[in-house]
Image (tube, rainbow, N blue to C red):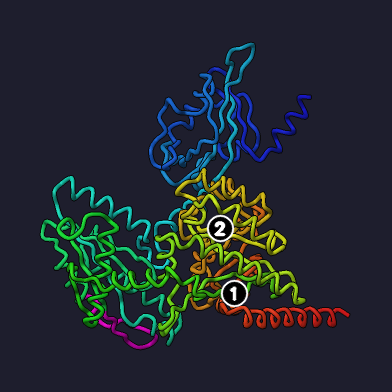
Amino acid sequence: MAPILRLVLDNMAEGVCVAGCDGRIITANPAAEAVFGPLGGVAFDAQFGSRLRLEDGVSPCPEALWPMGRAIRGETMDRESLYLAAAVSGGAPADGAGCGAGGGAGVWLRVNARPLVQDGRSVGGVLVFRDITQVKAVEDRIAWLAHFDPLTGLPNRVEFRRRLEAAIAAARRDDTRLAVMLLDFDGLKEINDQFGHAVGDELLVAVARRLRDALAAGTTIARLGGDEFTVIVEEGGGRTADAASQSLIRAMAEPFPLAGGRHRLTVSIGVVGHPAQSEGADDLLRKADMAMYRAKERGGSTVCRYDPAMTDAAAERTRLRGLLAGALERGEFHLAYQPLVEAAGGRPVGVEALLRWQPPGDAAPVPPSVFIPLCEASGLILPIGRWVLETACRQIRNWADGGGPPLEVAVNVSPRQLRDPALLEDVRTVLEATGIDPALLVLEVTEGLLIEDMDYSRHVLTGLKRLGVRLALDDFGTGYSSLSYLNSLPFDVLKMDGSFTRNLGAADLDNAGGQAVARAIIGLARSLSMTLVAEGVETPAQHAWLAANGCRLIQGYLIGRPEPAPSAATLIRRLAAEHERRQNERFDFVI
């Protein structure tokens, strides 16, 4: 039996090392020695303990927590992460570099430790560990993306809110003042339309750089999205919001080099102070937004402080809330359908159902980003969500009854719906009423919904899976992006946010980092046996890159815009015909 056990140890991917009561290694397998170097007779903790770092990768691991000593003392370790720093000349460890053989890059280890027990007493210790350096790198990158904007490197909305709440708490504690400035740049949409998004992105990067240069070191500057930036000014020591806003106006007065020419941007700045004008983080942002829109009304390169009379935006929201109250009964909503196709071939496999609202008397539809939060806050999203679910399922049933191919339909589930106890029964009722195959219904949830109440989310998602529907995690990579819930929640589909798609395949851009993250997400979906959908595909180059790198499905304006059901059906027939033609051409070529 011993030779078989030795063979098993030698072929394990995990490192295994066994020590006696004196802490010296009795035996170790090749995977262990690949990390630590030759181990025979080595006093493990004495040799490597000073090079171990805790989960933050910096703090030295206390001697009492050195793994082999813990195991020998009868303690256990379960999947604890430790960083092994490199040994440099003279044996001293170097954080962030080096591994066991004495050089190279440091390694992250996931360690399990157990006492070696014989006749009821500990006679040594056993360590079993795995090198998780690559996994950690992906986790760290995704964690960074959850808090920072990948384009500019500035804090995103999540990180900005965290910093704002901390600044408010400090101001209350120290009886000091702060101000929030909301910045909106005029003309970026026109630049995107005229020169393309790549040039627009270059301009956003230049804007972020100029903002950093114009403000004092340590000032929080964040990009909330699009062309909207925000700044926290902790006033005191000569720093004031007025001085900061004028510095920004001067900084933006200089034209930006752009597409072989020079382009001048104007900025509208809304300012609100704490505690004089506002208390909490939400109130500060709301009032800064009001002030910023008043600045835009007054013309570019204008600063406007919040005034209690700024109620126009609030009044418009009140008007829309009143119209929404009867919109469903008046038949003002409709669904638009955007196709999903196979990246490697173009076969249409489904559609995403998207809610649209056209109030009577309004010249243009109200953007979903405006009316859906109002529905969510008022609770109207529950009856509207049920209508969306039933309408979308009946539509794909009608298409199938009309001779079309079976198509899956993706329906977004809002935070309020996910918390609704009636959700499971609503889905069951719709499936029975429409008679569609439950596997054709894909319910999409966003990452932020899961963090609020993980246990309840798991309960609801598991119940939905029992109905036979499929579950998709939407906008992956823009929120919390924890790998742990991907592994523990029953998702079938991972939707990669369009921000990761934008520059894929663009030969004139240095986008190695973005491509590496996209590959990591594609590989993550594959390893978890999940279908990956890339959103926001707008160019053939993006399509080609995604297909070449193993992305399963794509969605975006390159394939088709969201359209009402009749136009969507026509588009799907055309896509199916094009796919069949390509297949026939390939078959004819083979013949």
Circle 1 Cα neighbour tier, 10 Å, few/some/many (<14 / 14–19 / ≥20): many
Q: Note whether 280 is above or below 305 in the view shown.
A: above
Q: Which stretch is magenta?
A: 251-266
* Residue found at x 58% / y 12%: 121
Give the left or right position of residue 543, taking residue 499 as reference. right
Can you say whether 54 is above or below 441 in the image? above
Q: Nearer the viewer, residue 572 or 140?
A: 572
SS for callout 1? strand
Pick the residue in front: 79 or 276: 276
- Judging by the rendered image, the residue that carries numbered circle 1 is 337
Identified by mark 1, the residue type is Tyr
Q: Residue at x 36, y 83 (%)?
A: 258
Which quadrant would the N terminus be assigned to in this image?
Answer: top right
Is 89 displayed left or right of 390 in the figure?
left
As drawn, the label of residue 473 is 2
Farthest residue to the left: give it.
238
> If the image is split into quadrants, where does the C terminus sit?
bottom right
Q: Nearer the viewer, mark 1 or mark 2?
A: 1
